[in-house]
Image (spheres, coloured by chain):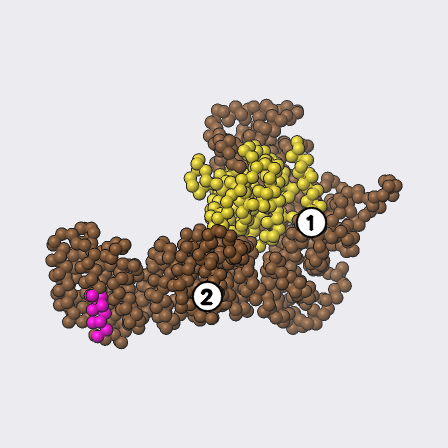
Chain colours: A yellow, B brown
């Protein structure tokens, strides 16, 4: 299952320290990890929420670092794309996967798949035994929809002001963090529902 | 993409002041009081979400607002459902009104409210009651109701399984097993959504159900699976998709865990009459009589076999082709899971697995499907007595050699190795020889996989291959450069028209240097520790010193060397350790010329040279010839200061009869003379152009080493005093060419004086300069014969009344 989906910055920002990443959207699926461990059950709800936010921030920083190193190593020039060129942006995106050890920061080992589309990163935190082929396809699909429906290649801030669209997208394509084996017909059916919602 | 606008929005959301926030809350409450919900309501709710989620510190909402939001969860408008659940997820439940998980019925909530309820579960008890509610409604559900209302229950159930598998009772498991069997195996085989066979004269009455189709367009001849298509889908076909999506997790959670008690029985049975049992189950026509768990296993088996067959069809759409691959991976993993649980299934599964392997093994684009197949072979190959050599040749041979630049394959391959390490070390002897290939993954993308190699490297260190592994690790940056050249050579034309081509690329393509590069690119260990023309190779790759990928690689080598040395001392005998010392001395000047890299490697070498000699002091006498040669070369002081200092130190410390009886007076004298010569030279002339003066530490270490040697062979003491008096004279003159700092010079001279005073009492000098072990590691309280315990015992017996 997927534990977490996040969208964050991967470019250097003047407002934050170098290496830090601004999380623009994050969704953790399921109950807090602390439900199982006795240690974390002693935390108050505020502390649990804080802990969860910190964990997401850790993932964002790690992905930021991975994207920067990958781009540096490949030496490819970043291609600027404009709204309308979502498919191209996705094709040109850097992608990779990394391992998060148990305890750092999630209590079990996780695999993080990431896509770096220009100045933003899209990351999926999955359990380590998950079907990564399926996860990769799902991540690309989610990213494409986000880029299109939230006009992310432009200068707008819809990712912040229309985050409910991402919520609906996730509820159809990744319900409660469940990866789905969707052939093109099933996917079309769900995407029609999503498009109908976005039109409101 | 990320604009100043977004940044300022986040800042505003974080820095909103309390009075303004309260005003906002009040306005929102008023908006929510109305019957109609306008765009303003939606925008305000979205703004509220931003304010709450932008900060990691929790803001509490006024209770009135929170109540209104809770009531919005069941609003008919999906937008309001989504927004209210998003907002409530970012805040805390009202105190005193914590959700009573026994009251709400999750199955009657819409998907957003249900997900919210799930995310707010605070304990196992909450999850248990959610689970019970879901399964109760599953049991009693009639088949009407809005579509997806059932489908959103399976993901919730799967989440509960992840966090708290004990929530399900035996009855629950039986119920769900039965349901899963129905959905997986007996879903409708006609298209849903009112699809008709078309035609001019069709009316509602003549609408005939259209059968489902395969991905290549042909009509489907068997039961429905995720690889079947139709114009529309029925509810149970949706459930088929959701069921398959969670099937592996279900099997992993319940079929391996709960079988813990009966595992011993099934193993015995299969061992005793393995072949007989397999014949019987090969023709399982009696599946209807099986208990629910076994029935699910049987149906899952059939589903996977069908998927494997369906994946051979040529899909019309690219996304479907990708799905077929994902399905192959999933199907093989599920079959593996089932066979682990019931070994009699292995004989039924293997023909299918073997055929699939045969079909895919020549096509590297299926590499990620071949890994789960390799896992199957590893787990069950022995039972089925199948030869797995071709599998391992792929996994350890072709994959790392040809697909090193696929980050996903690298990740999965390394995970496969990590998870199966013990098994591989037992069953696959070529594993420990395959490090030249495996290290290609590291050389290409060090930051992504170094963590995996930290775990795997110890298993690759064996006495037989240690020296070759050390050389390979030291030349990892060269391998990195070579891989880059290999890829460029394949993609660039042979001669670029009028362009400047890389020198290194020319060298790579040059037949006379072919052997060098081929050695680096070798797949297996055993053909030689390293090559003679290593320095030539380094020169050819000189321009790679500033390639980012190569630099990233150099940053991981020191860590891996530490791991290597830590492991090798546990498996090596003294002969091998001696060889490793020689390799360190030799390679300290034979490294790819990247300044920071050379410095770091020298530091690692120094550390481990010291450790090896501490563990086995006789190594110093053993290798005295080479160590002396190193210590006697003045140039080493300037180019390899760190290592030089440590070599001199170990010579001074361990070249003595007490460490090794082979140590003779002649050896001590020749060592003394070699070091004395160097010391004279570096303290009388300026450093060669381009180098800086030697650090005071080198000089004082040399002096101390000489003093230690002299304390063991007293004839040498006058020579030490001669040197020290010369030093004093020279330093009185003020500054010297070989030491730039006056304070350093004073420290050096002071040290010299201390050593000289010590040597005036030769008998004491030896025990002060090289104290015997019982002095350096005192055992006062542990050694029962030493005075302190005796005294304490005496006192105790005196003070305790009889």
Q: Sequence-wise, which precedes: disc 1 or disc 2?
A: 1
Residue at the disc numbered 1: B317
Compared with B233, B255 (above or below) is: below
Instruction: Left or right? Give the position of A184 relative to B754.
Output: right
- Whether the residues at callouts 1 and 2 have beta carbons within 8 Å, the answer is no
Question: Quarter-wise, where is residue B768 in the image?
Answer: bottom left
**Measuring 16% from the left and 69% from the top, which residue is drawn there?**
B716
Q: Is residue B671 magenta?
A: yes
Q: Nearer the viewer, mark 1 or mark 2?
A: 2
Give coordinates of residue A196: x percent, y percent: 68, 35
In whole angstroms, how far apart are the C-alphas of marks 1 and 2? 48 Å
How many residues crowd around disc 2 within 10 Å: few (fewer than 14), some, or many (20 or more)? few
Compared with A178, B538 (above or below) is: below
**Measuring 74% from the left and 64% from the top, which residue is drawn there?**
B284
Label 1 secondary element: loop
Instruction: Left or right? Give the position of B370 relative to B316.
Output: left
């Amino acid at each position: 299952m997927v534990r977490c989906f996040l969208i964050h910055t991967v470019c250097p920002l003047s407002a934050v320290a170098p290496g830090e990443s601004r999380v623009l959207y994050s969704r953790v699926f399921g109950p807090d990890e602390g439900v199982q461990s006795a240690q974390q059950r002693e935390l108050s709800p505020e502390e649990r929420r804080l802990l969860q936010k910190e964990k997401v921030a850790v993932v964002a920083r790690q992905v930021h670092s991975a994207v920067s190193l990958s781009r540096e190593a490949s030496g490819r020039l970043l291609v600027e794309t404009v709204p309308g060129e979502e498919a191209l942006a996705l094709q040109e995106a850097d992608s990779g996967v990394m391992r998060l050890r148990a305890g750092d920061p999630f209590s079990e080992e996780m695999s993080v798949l990431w896509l770096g589309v220009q100045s933003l990163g899209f990351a999926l935190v999955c359990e380590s035994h998950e079907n990564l082929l399926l996860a990769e396809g799902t991540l690309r699909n989610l990213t494409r929809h986000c880029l299109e429906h939230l006009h992310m290649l432009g200068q707008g801030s819809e990712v912040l002001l229309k985050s409910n669209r991402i919520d609906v997208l996730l509820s159809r394509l990744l319900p409660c963090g469940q990866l789905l084996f969707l052939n093109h017909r099933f996917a079309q059916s769900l995407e029609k529902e999503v498009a109908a919602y976005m039109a409101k | 993409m990320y604009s100043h606008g977004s940044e300022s929005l986040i800042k505003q959301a974080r820095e909103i002041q309390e009075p303004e926030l309260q005003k906002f809350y009040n306005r929102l409450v008023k908006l929510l009081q109305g019957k109609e919900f306008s765009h303003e309501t939606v925008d305000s709710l979205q703004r509220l979400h931003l304010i709450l989620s932008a900060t990691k510190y929790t803001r509490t909402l006024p209770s009135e607002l929170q109540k209104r939001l809770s009531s919005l969860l069941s609003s008919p408008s999906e937008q309001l459902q989504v927004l209210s659940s998003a907002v409530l997820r970012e805040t805390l439940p009202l105190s005193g009104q914590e959700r009573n998980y026994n009251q709400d019925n999750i199955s009657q909530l819409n998907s957003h409210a249900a997900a919210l309820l799930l995310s707010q579960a605070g304990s196992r008890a909450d999850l248990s009651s959610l689970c019970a509610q879901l399964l109760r409604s599953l049991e009693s559900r009639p088949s009407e109701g809005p579509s997806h209302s059932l489908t959103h229950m399976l993901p919730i159930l799967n989440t509960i399984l992840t966090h708290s598998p004990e929530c399900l009772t035996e009855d629950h498991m039986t119920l769900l097993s039965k349901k899963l069997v129905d959905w997986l195996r007996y879903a409708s085989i006609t298209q849903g959504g009112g699809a008709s066979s078309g035609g001019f004269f069709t009316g509602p009455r003549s609408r005939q159900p259209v059968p489902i189709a395969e991905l290549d367009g042909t009509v489907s001849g068997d039961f429905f699976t995720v690889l079947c298509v139709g114009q529309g889908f029925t509810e149970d076909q949706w459930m088929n998709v959701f069921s398959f999506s969670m099937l592996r997790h279900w099997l992993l959670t319940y079929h391996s865990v709960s079988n813990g008690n009966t595992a011993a029985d099934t193993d015995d049975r299969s061992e005793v009459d393995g072949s007989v049992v397999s014949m019987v189950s090969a023709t399982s026509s009696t599946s209807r009589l099986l208990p629910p768990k076994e029935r699910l296993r049987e149906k899952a088996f059939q589903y996977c076999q069908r998927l494997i067959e369906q994946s051979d069809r040529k899909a019309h759409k690219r996304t479907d082709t990708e799905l077929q691959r994902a399905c192959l991976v999933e199907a093989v993993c599920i079959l593996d899971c089932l066979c682990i649980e019931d070994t009699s299934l292995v004989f039924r599964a293997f023909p299918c697995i073997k055929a699939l392997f045969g079909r895919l093994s020549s096509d590297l684009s299926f590499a990620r499907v071949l890994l789960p197949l390799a896992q199957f072979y590893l787990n069950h190959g022995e039972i089925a007595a199948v030869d797995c050599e071709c599998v391992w040749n792929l996994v350890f041979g072709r994959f790392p050699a040809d697909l090193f630049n696929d980050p996903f394959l690298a990740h999965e391959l390394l995970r496969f190795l990590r998870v199966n390490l013990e098994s591989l070390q037992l069953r696959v002897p070529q594993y420990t020889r395959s490090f030249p290939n495996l290290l290609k993954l590291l050389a290409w993308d060090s930051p992504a996989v170094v963590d995996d190699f930290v775990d795997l490297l110890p298993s690759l260190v064996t006495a037989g291959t240690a020296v070759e592994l050390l050389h390979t690790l030291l030349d990892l940056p060269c391998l990195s450069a070579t891989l880059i050249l290999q890829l460029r050579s394949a993609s660039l034309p042979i001669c670029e028209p009028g362009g400047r081509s890389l020198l290194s690329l020319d060298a790579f393509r040059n037949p006379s240097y072919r052997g060098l590069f081929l050695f680096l690119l070798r797949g297996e260990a055993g053909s030689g520790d390293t090559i003679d023309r290593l320095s030539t190779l380094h020169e050819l790759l000189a321009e790679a010193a500033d390639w980012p990928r190569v630099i990233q690689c150099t940053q991981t080598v020191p860590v891996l060397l530490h791991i290597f040395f830590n492991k090798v001392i546990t498996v090596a005998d003294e002969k091998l350790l001696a060889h490793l010392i020689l390799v360190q001395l030799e390679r300290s000047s034979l490294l790819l010329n990247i300044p920071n890299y050379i410095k770091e490697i020298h530091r690692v070498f120094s550390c481990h040279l010291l450790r090896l000699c501490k563990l086995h002091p006789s190594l110093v006498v053993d290798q005295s010839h080479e160590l002396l040669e190193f210590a006697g070369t003045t140039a080493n002081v300037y180019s390899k200061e760190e290592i030089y200092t440590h070599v001199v130190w170990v010579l001074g410390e361990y070249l003595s009869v007490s460490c090794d009886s082979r140590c003779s007076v002649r050896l001590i004298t020749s060592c003394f003379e070699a070091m004395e010569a160097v010391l004279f030279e570096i303290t009388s002339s300026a450093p060669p152009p381009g180098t800086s003066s030697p650090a005071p530490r080198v000089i004082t270490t040399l002096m101390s080493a000489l003093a230690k040697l002299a304390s063991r062979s007293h004839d040498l003491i006058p020579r030490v005093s001669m040197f020290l008096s010369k030093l004093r004279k020279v330093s009185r003159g003020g500054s010297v060419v070989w030491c730039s700092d006056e304070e350093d010079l004073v420290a050096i001279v002071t040290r010299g004086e201390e050593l000289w005073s010590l040597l005036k009492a030769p008998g004491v000098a030896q025990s002060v300069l090289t104290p015997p072990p019982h002095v350096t590691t005192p055992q006062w309280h542990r050694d029962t014969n030493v005075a302190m315990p005796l005294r304490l015992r005496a006192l105790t017996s005196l003070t305790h009344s009889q």
